[in-house]
Amino acid sequence: MELDGALESSSLVELTQRRLRREILSGALAPGERLIEEHLTARFGTSRAPLREALSQLAQQGLIEHLPRRGVRVAELSAADSDELFGLRNLLERYAVESAFAQPAPVDLAALAAAWQQMADAARTGDAFAENNAHQRFHVEVVALAGQRHLLLAFEPVILKLQLLMATNLRLEAQQRDAGQGVERHRRLLDALGAGELPAILHALDSHGARTYIG
């Protein structure tokens, strides 16, 4: 009986976390917006314990923040935070690419190409949440090209904290230009990696528009 209860609670935590994450990354919950437990438990039909565990997981992902004596809100990064995190992302990706193409073995782009295809499919169907997830995976796969476990471990918290800014960038780009523009920018980077010319790859990496619409 206790096991059934534990499984039910775990399922509620996962469902609540997924729903909140989708709402945050889609823009339904804006950066800085307060999250009131009473409202969320009533809306999601859950108790406080699963909700608080879901909020804890989202805080670890950098999507929400707990403020002393002020409750919980959707994360809101300053311009300085944004610059620092995008700078770290670019630095780690550049190092990963340089390391990958310094190796004698061919660079396997299959996982990266699959992430790009998922991004393209999601953009075509208008699924912004799926596109955000594929976008995040694309950048993880860029760093994974180096085949360095500790590099990937160092990169993961950076990309988690950036996911809200990256989602905002793609959403604003789709509103101001065309949803396919973000996909096209990443295709150019994928094509450069496929050609294997390091100077062209680094140029594509530097110019693929990390924060074109939010900076």
Image (cartoon, helix red, strand yellow):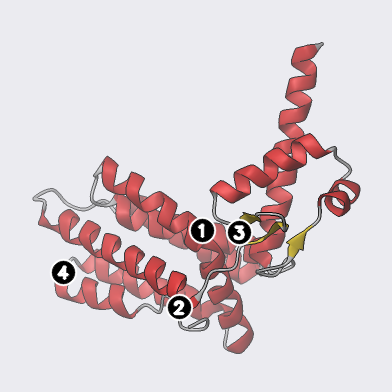
Q: 10 Å neighbourhood of mark 4: few (<14), some, or many (≥20)?
A: some
Question: In the drawing, what numbered circle is on residue 211?
Answer: 2
Question: In the drawing, what numbered circle is on residue 130?
Answer: 3
Q: Is residue 156 left or right of residue 178?
A: left
Q: CA distance from mark 2 to mark 1?
A: 17 Å
Quadrant in the picture for residue 3 = top right
Q: Is residue 84 left or right of residue 202?
A: right
Query: Measuring 85% from the left and 37% from the top, which residue is drawn there?
Result: 47
What residue sits right under mark 1 in the picture?
134
Quadrant in the picture for residue 69 = bottom right
Q: Nearer the viewer, mark 3 or mark 2?
A: 2
Decide which of tag 3 and tag 2 comes sooner along the chain. 3
| Labels 3 and 2 touching (C-beta < 8 A) | no
Q: Which amino acid, by three-letter code, is at mark 4? A: Leu
Q: CA distance from mark 2 to mark 4?
A: 23 Å
Q: CA distance from mark 1 to mark 3?
A: 6 Å
Question: In the drawing, what numbered circle is on residue 198?
Answer: 4
Q: Nearer the viewer, residue 203 or 27?
A: 27
Q: Which amino acid, by three-letter code, is at mark 3? A: Ala
Q: Is residue 10 left or right of residue 80?
A: right
